[in-house]
Amino acid sequence: MAEEISLTIDGETVRVARGTSVAAAILKTGKLSRTSVSGEPRGPFCGMGICMECRATIDGVAQQTTCRRQCEPGMEVVTG
Amino acid sequence: MTAQFDVVVVGAGPGGLAAATVSAEAGLRVCVVDDNPAAGGQIWRGQTESNGRARSWLARLQATQATVWNGLRVVDLAAEKRLRLEGASGGCDLLFDKLIVATGARERFLPFPGWTLPGVMGAGGAQALLKAGLKVQGRRAVVAGSGPLLLAVAASLRTHGAQVAAVCEQAPLRRLVRFGAGLWRHAGKLAEGVQYQLQSRFAPYRTNCWVARAEGAGKLERVVLTNGRRQWTVACDLLACGFNLVPNLELPLLLGCRVEEGLIQVDARQQSSCENVFCVGELTGVGGLDKALLEGQIAGWAAARDAQRVQALQRGLKKQKQFARRLEEAFALRPELRLLPEADTLVCRCEDVPYVALCGRSGWRDAKLRSRVGMGACQGRVCGAAAEFLFGWQKRDRRPPVFPATVATMAGEENNRN
């Protein structure tokens, strides 16, 4: 098993195997990534960086496609 | 930062890796850029160690002087022979003499009631997320849509501990049998197919079957399946659904490459209608791994002006193009799928534009101006491909940025956030 690392998602500490994408880490917590313009909850959908449903804030930078980013120790992710 | 290379390859899937490898072996200064955290593209995602062919191509590339940049997206052609890119740490420019575009394909998604519910994802999407660490133990999944990918996805889901309740292929059995019967000409592909079939033998594989709607309170709880005559319900908390692949034409369109019937037109050296711009792989016809590897090598040698090697490789291409055509025929989408969206079914997931807002519009542009369809963050990558099938509209937008980018990047500011 790969080494585990810790990051926070909406302030909650999450442990994942190194190499896990931020999108997969968000799904692991049971959370979703964003709220649509009409208020629907949305989660990762295409898994390959084109649908933009998995956007969340990573380390203060908004609108990051979380399926294209690997989790890093200490990363702070904010969904919604 | 600005860097200059003889050859810039966009996309590190099989086509891009092959193109970069041979042009670097020919002595050119090569840079490969890819938007994913690791090379391999969609097909070799997470398999660059375990898959023998992926491993050997990467090893061959690593033995050259080629530069590989991951996590960067091309967002614009900033000037002649100058690409602008953006990554997590900001923007940069790449100057090239020759450009090889290997941007691959994405899944086509079609709207049906409930397709925006959490728990519904793409078929290839589910597979990509599994490879990126998605946990599915104990989940009950339905795999649906169209294409040879469905069986592979079902096999992956089972391997990762999900129960696969059904695999639904919209194409009729007779077309698949005809397709399968022709596969003897592609022995490698047949072996792949058999392998997937064996791995997914515990899930019922139905042809002539598609998802009529997905239902649940706030998240997916069940899907209603149909064969056109009757409907039945299957409980599940994961639906992996995709309808074949569509090429990622955004960058070649921005560059001005000629497109016919949804595919980039290239000459025998893989050069597009734009001089010094070569296109390989799914961009010229969705044909999978072997076609991409072959076309990548042809473009790589063509960039190095080695006419002899280009000619030697062209012989194998006919068979690959034939396979691409057979694939397209076998998995052609049935017209009933156009009737799935209801008036309030969202077609555009970014701007939440319902189906009814698109009905009666004269084309993609008219629909965009009146409804904001395709004007959100995905820039019509999802709804454009759906509208093409639903309404027959051609989405041929060719304005920068190719992907959403910061103003600082577009302005060419040196920007380093990290």
Image (cartoon, coloured by chain):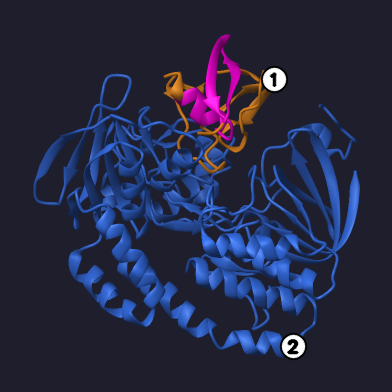
Chain colours: A orange, B blue
Range shown magenta: A3-27
Chain ID at mark 1: A
Q: Left or right: where does residue B346 sit relative to residue A1?
A: left
Q: Position of residue A59 (x, y in %)?
A: 69, 20
Residue B4 included in the magenta stretch of the image: no
Name the residue type under label 1: Asp
Q: Residue at x 9, y 51 (%)?
A: B229
Would residue B256 be visible to someone looking at this image?
A: no
Q: Residue furthest top?
A: A11
Return the x and y of residue B121 as percentages of the image width and height. Answer: 39, 38
Residue B72 sits above or below residue A42 on the image: below
Q: Is residue B404 visible?
A: yes
**Disc 2 chain ID:** B
The relative height of residue B365 versus residue A69 in the rendered view (above or below) is below
How far apart in space, not on screen, are marks 2 and 1 (Cα)?
A: 50 Å
Amino acid type of the residue that numbered disc 2 sits on in the rendered structure: Ala
Q: What residue is disc 2 on? A: B307
Q: Position of residue A39 (x, y in %)?
A: 45, 18
User: Does residue B209 appear left or right of residue B263 in this picture?
Assistant: left
Which residue is the site of mark 1? A59
Question: SS for tag 2?
Answer: helix
